[in-house]
Image (cartoon, coloured by chain):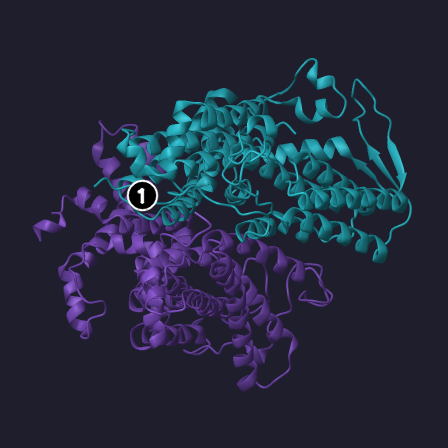
Amino acid sequence: MSGTDKTPPTETEDKATEDRAPEAPEAPSRSHSLLREIASGNALAGVLAVVLAVAVGSLMIALTDEEVRETASYVFARPADFFNALWDAIWGAYTALFRGAVYNDRVDDFATQIRPLTETLKFAAPLIAAGLGVGLAFRAGMFNIGGRGQMLLAGAAAGWVAANVDLPTVVHLPLAIIAGMVAGALWAGIAGVLKARTGAHEVIVTIMLNYVGFYLVFFALSRQSLLQAPGSGNPKSAPAAETAVMPKILGDRFNLHLGFLLALVAVAIVWWLLNRATLGYRIRAVGENPHAARAAGIDVGRTYVVVMLIAGALVGLAGTNQVLGTVTSGVTVDLDAGIGFDAITVALLGRSRPLGILLAGLLFGAFKAGGFAMQASEGIPVDIVLVVQSLIVLFIAAPPLVRAIFRLPAKEAK
Amino acid sequence: MTTAGLTPAPAPTAGPVVDTVPVVSKKTPIIFGVLTVGMALILLFEGQSGETTFRLAARTDFVQLPELTVPTMAGAWTLTVVCALLTAESVRRYLARRRTPLWLLAVYAVAWMAAFLTWAAAGESVPVVGLLAGSIALAVPLVFGALGGVLGERSGVVNIAIDGQLLFGAFAAAMIGSVTGSPWVGLVAAMVAGALVALVLGLFAITYFVDQVIVGVVLNVLVIGLTSFLFSQVLAPNSESLNTPPRFPRVPIPVLGDIPLIGPVFFRQTAVVYLLYIAVALVAFALYRTRWGLRVRAVGEHPKAADTVGIKVNRTRYRTILVAGAVAGMGGAFYTLVSVPQFNREMTGGAGYIALAAVIFGKWDPIRATLAALLFGFASNLQGVLAVLGSPVPSQFMLMLPYVVTIFAVAGLVGRSRPPAADGVPYRKE
């Protein structure tokens, strides 16, 4: 799998979507192609994948619930007890999830009621930004698994600027964000350069860079001269200065910060880049077929490097989002909080399209916000969210499987 | 080293080749030179004083080897000179258009490592037996995982899910081992669990043509989620009945275990480790010396050609990855049935990715991958030992080593690492 640049992952991504009606890529009218996508059953497959994954999640919740197991022991004597317990467990879990992710009907004032929604947006922001980074690389036929390392490096760079530079907010915050994005870009760029120059497979290189980055940041965090907070013995940096913290966009009552708006801007920019810019055309051409792209005069190696630089900057944005917005008390090695890997699932569910990634990011942000609420109120471990997420991606990736399960007609029948 | 005998190298070094000039890589002498100069620079600028002691035997050993005490700087310089001589020999061989043989590489590695240890442990004593035995303990899951990876990839299925197989194996071994009270049943359960993950991988990668890297990554996440969820929901509340697996006892092999140095390191281990020795030999033998192995390799290199001569490509791939999953699952069992008698969330700590690194660094060859995994185990154990001794090298850089080495390996700086030709390509019959 390493070595030459054969079989870029997008090929399969496209295989997964091959049931789409044959169409010119990115038809001029968005609404038209959107309608066609829905009609061709692609969106349907996505929804069914989510349904299927949630069903499996429900099964797991039910099977591991104390009361369900107790009532199951006398299910033939009093079946009603069993089904009540089953219903309670599943219904309780999903209402808790909803209450934690969208709307809490158990409190009085409106602001507290919609607070979960803002939490969802807060969790979605880094997922969208990092998802764009992974998705963009997919479009060029590259698989960026290095989200974790890129976020760590970006967070470390942004955290260093935030804690050690003294500037007014207008300059300080942008400078910290840019520092983070540049660090992420450079870290991802290593994989791009190695692929372009030596043909080293980016999957292996980015996985390895995750660990190298982890230990590098860990090292910096345990040296006073580098990143560690002065006078501290813990591997943690000093908190970000006030001037470098992302402002809360809905006032201090909500945790939602500037990072979400930046993620939206990133979606717009990536959409423009992919669909309107020459570079985006090159990226897609290389992703579709690097040999044809090379024959057409596109510098494939350079495209790989540029794509990884941009992808790293986007993932880096997610890293700065964490350090300057969500957890401003200082950089730690846990700052990526699994987002680097979640981003892969976001990009896959969003089919590597900017708008799809936006929606997928919102969905997984809701899962995250709701998952923590579910753990707090129902005692269901938040890990169930990981299971559901990964199942969604598996089902999405294999449309024939979903079709077989739901006995949908194959594509010829449409 | 024993590898030369077991591995039929594709391009044999011996024997004159008619009409062709053998291409000899100059990378080995260059790397030797860089390492030697690096060692000399360390000694010049970061000199240490005092003496270094190497403890060659544990106190309970039958044969007591004397402790070896050397003056730090003199010892380190002597070994560096040995390294320089070996480098010169390697250069001489390169100029004579001959490859640097494996034994030279091994001697060089030992000499360099000894020089480094002598310098790093100045004023302390190095427990050589503990260092090596600990390396084996850390390397066992890596070797099992790497063997699973080699098998899968040789048949053309990229196995990123090694980590998932290790973790699920560890989980199953802990749970079934606790319930039945037998470590052997736990081991079998771990193999089944590993094979189960492989089966899902196969279903998506072989039957549904989903990108194998994607499936692998997602499967790892799925297994982390699944085991963590079940751990919190089921194992943690009932830890006496479900999460206290019996441990494999340490079984010293009668005569071999009494050999000084080698005995305590290799032959006073648990049954799982002995199974590992067998597994390595078996996989190497089966892959290169049996009809089954030939078919597996054919399917991985050129599935169409294999299909043409009547080999069932997808069936072969399924069988191979199921075996590979079972092997990797055994590595998972090592965590819960030998190391720590308890399952914990994410307890493999990404070891599967190091195993993957070992597969690539070992050039998709079972013996080389095993050696790579042992090297990585040694690096991480050395880090622990040096941390105790208070070495001048930051521990993070030692921990980083396997990953950096792998990046160099895939970038072709440490000899080209070429995967099987059809690795990662699903086979569609036309």
> Looking at the picture, how far across and down is residue A132, in whole percent?
38, 66
In the image, farthest residue toward the top: B254
> Looking at the picture, how far across and down is residue B146, in whole percent?
51, 37
Q: Is residue B325 above or below residue B46?
A: above
> Looking at the picture, how far across and down is residue A23, in whole percent?
17, 64
Q: Is residue A362 above or below residue B344?
A: below
Circle 1 marks a residue in which chain?
B
Residue at 35% x, 29% y is B319
Residue under label 1: B426
Q: Is residue B268 left or right of residue A12?
A: right
Q: Which quarter of the figure has residue B164?
A: top left
Total of numbered circles in the picture? 1
Q: Is residue B401 left or right of residue A208?
A: right
Q: Is residue B172 above or below residue A322?
A: above
Q: Is residue A319 left or right of residue B93?
A: left
Figure chain in cyan: B
Judged from the image, the secondary structure of the residue bearing numbered disc 1 is loop
Q: Is residue B423 left or right of residue A191?
A: left
**Crowd rating for badge 1 (residues with CA inside 10 Å; few <14, some 14–19, many 20+):** many
Amino acid found under the numbered disc labelled 1 = Pro
> Closest to the observer: A157 or B300?
B300
Is residue B83 visible to us here?
Answer: yes
> Looking at the picture, how far across and down is residue B6, in whole percent?
56, 26
In the image, farthest residue toward the front: B19
> Closest to the observer: B224 or B297?
B297
> Closest to the observer: B394 or A91?
B394
Q: Which quarter of the figure has residue B127?
A: top right
Q: Colour of chain A?
A: purple
Residue at 64% x, 79% y is A165
Residue at 71% x, 46% y is B91
Residue at 39% x, 23% y is B291
